């Protein structure tokens, strides 16, 4: 391999010929051959946006030469276009705070800017990684800012659309399965009837509320500590630098980022990221429950519940011919497990902040963005390849509903809990339907029994109660409106000008 010789504050470094990164990045490559993992492309884009915005702000203040500033902006635009993706080579597990990552970006931008200005790679007399690309910045505020920008953009543009699409598809299934009555289950044991539609509606609500929690929390990511430099004081920045940088970040992203209310607090802690991670944890828990449920409901096809059919997307076994597994639900389970691992890493790293800085930023960045990425991808695949193709086995559902000994619950108010329990136990012992046994024993008149033990009626009890409540509300509202109208009419007869005339005419007659 051919090399060029560069020098940093520690001495000479051999840098691969043709690379756009420089000495400090090369040192990091040699010092941290840990995992082969790199920070995500969305983080690199966020870094480039921050650097581009800083160059524009420094040029506007007159601190950065216009020619150099324009070259840095052009270089950042090329990074944003993905031209130099292979030049960001620092391992996730690197120097604290992400100094190596920051210098990797600074060196790529500086070297490309040198080229643009007619110089050679490594000719830092034209454009310097620290003096120009990193002007008015430190690792501490730029990496922190890039985490917020990348996290917000990835949630807004990736995760939330995927979650809302899943919510919408579950809602469509809920409407389609509204008339399918089945046995409810609590403790994995038979319970009173419910409709399959209501189960799916609950899933849709879980996902929808999860989205709401994420939306409520990720506003905190809009606060940026850019301009705080090393510890929050803003040392070495122009008074208008912070405001200008944020304006340019907003122009680049289309979002409304703002300066942190307290830059010292923002640089020391990662409460905003933790708040988002907490909301994601609730969503993950719901997704895990939904995928577990679908695996249970589709278990079989002969020896399980078999109440729904998941679409067959691939053969399920390398040894058992014809076997089809719930692979999309299994995939989503694994995504959830990994997401919870990301969450644990974020929590531990966020707790490791000391004094004026949390130096665990690279691992926070990687795990936050990976959690967002896999959740978005997992939900998209689960929606498109699984949920859209779910079919109900109506006959199986209704058969289980008819056989459930929990139907005796409907008799409890009429014959008492103990008698109903005895009836349920006898029905199980004799392997007969609750209805047939109750009719045989004549515990209540036949018409009453058929009405009370109708699974469909039991599954619709909630909606019936809601309708009744709505009816009572409507009647009460109507009564109030009627009284109001009556009072108004009386008032018009006795107190209004026309009322006096009518009263006078009556007296005259």
Image: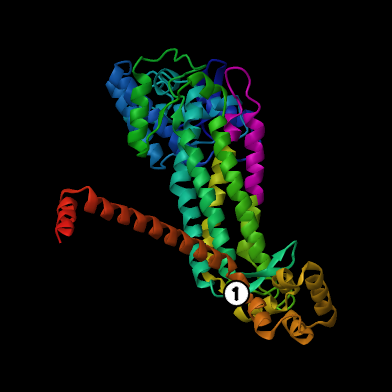
Which residue is denoted by mark 1 in the rendering? 457
Q: State the image coordinates of residue 453 (x, y, percent, origin top left).
A: 67, 77
> Left or right: where does residue 316 sit relative to residue 496?
right
Q: Residue furthest right?
A: 429
Locate residue 444: give its quadrant: bottom right
- Helix, strand or loop at label 1? It is helix
Q: Which quadrant of the figure contains the C terminus?
A: bottom left
Q: State the image coordinates of residue 401 (x, y, percent, origin top left).
A: 67, 76
Q: State the image coordinates of residue 446 (x, y, percent, origin top left).
A: 68, 85
> Left or right: where does residue 269 sit relative to residue 334?
left
Residue 351 on the magenta segment? yes
> At 85% across and 79% down in the image, what residue appears?
429
Q: Is residue 314 visible?
A: no
Residue 452 on the magenta segment? no
Q: State the image coordinates of residue 498 (x, y, percent, origin top left).
A: 15, 52
> At 63% across and 65% down in the image, what residue appears?
294
Main secondary-structure element of the magenta-colored stretch: helix
Q: Is residue 183 above or below residue 116?
A: below
> Left or right: where does residue 178 sit relative to residue 488?
right
Q: Is residue 220 visible?
A: yes
> Left or right: where does residue 278 sit relative to residue 421?
left
Residue closer to the observer: 378 or 286:
286
Locate residue 129: give its quadrant: top left
In the image, which residues are magenta? 337-364
Residue closer to the observer: 466 or 70:
466
Marker count (numbered): 1
């Amino acid at each position: 391999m051919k090399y060029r010789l560069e020098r940093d504050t520690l001495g000479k470094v051999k840098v691969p010929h043709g690379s756009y990164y420089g000495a400090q990045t090369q040192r990091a490559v040699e010092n941290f051959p840990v995992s082969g993992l790199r920070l995500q492309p969305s983080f690199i884009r966020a870094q480039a946006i921050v650097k581009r915005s800083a160059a524009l702000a420094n040029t506007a203040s007159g601190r950065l030469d216009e020619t150099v500033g324009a070259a840095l902006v052009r270089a950042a635009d090329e990074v944003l276009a993905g031209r130099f993706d292979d030049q960001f080579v620092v391992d996730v597990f690197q120097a604290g705070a992400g100094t190596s990552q920051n210098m990797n970006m600074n060196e790529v931008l500086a070297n490309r800017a040198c080229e643009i200005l007619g110089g050679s790679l490594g000719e830092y007399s034209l454009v310097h990684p620290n003096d120009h690309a990193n002007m008015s910045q430190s690792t501490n505020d730029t990496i922190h800012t890039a985490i917020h920008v990348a996290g917000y953009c990835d949630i807004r543009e990736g995760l939330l659309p995927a979650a809302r699409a899943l919510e919408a598809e579950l809602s469509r299934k809920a409407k389609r399965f509204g008339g399918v009555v089945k046995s409810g289950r609590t403790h994995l044991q038979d319970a009173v009837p419910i409709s399959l539609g209501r189960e799916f509606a609950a899933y849709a609500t879980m996902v929808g509320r999860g989205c709401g929690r994420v939306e409520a929390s990720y506003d905190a990511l809009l606060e940026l500590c850019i301009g705080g430099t090393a510890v929050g004081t803003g040392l070495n920045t122009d008074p208008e630098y912070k405001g200008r940088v944020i304006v340019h970040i907003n122009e680049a992203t289309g979002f409304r980022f703002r300066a942190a209310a307290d830059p010292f607090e923002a640089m020391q802690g990662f409460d905003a990221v933790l708040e988002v991670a907490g909301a994601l944890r609730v969503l993950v828990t719901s997704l895990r429950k939904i995928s577990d449920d679908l695996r249970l409901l589709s278990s079989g096809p002969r020896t399980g519940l078999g109440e729904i059919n998941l679409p067959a997307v691939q053969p399920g076994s390398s040894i058992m011919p014809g076997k089809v597994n719930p692979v999309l639900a299994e995939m989503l389970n694994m995504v959830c497990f990994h997401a919870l691992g990301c969450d644990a890493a974020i929590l531990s790293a966020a707790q490791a902040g000391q004094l004026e800085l949390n130096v665990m930023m690279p691992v926070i960045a990687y795990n936050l963005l990976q959690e967002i990425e896999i959740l978005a991808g997992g939900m998209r695949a689960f929606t498109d390849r699984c949920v859209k193709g779910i079919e109900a086995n109506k006959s199986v559902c209704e058969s289980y509903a008819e056989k459930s000994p929990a139907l005796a619950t409907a008799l409890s108010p009429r014959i008492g809990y103990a008698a109903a329990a005895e009836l349920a136990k006898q029905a199980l012992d004799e392997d007969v339907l609750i209805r047939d046994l109750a009719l045989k024993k004549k515990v209540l008149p036949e018409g009453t029994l058929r009405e009370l033990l109708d699974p469909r009626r039991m599954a619709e009890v909630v909606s019936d109660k809601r309708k009744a409540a709505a009816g009572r509300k409507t009647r009460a509202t109507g009564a109030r409106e009627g009284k109001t109208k009556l009072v108004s009419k009386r008032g018009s007869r006795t107190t209004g000008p026309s009322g006096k005339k009518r009263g006078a005419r009556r007296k005259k007659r």
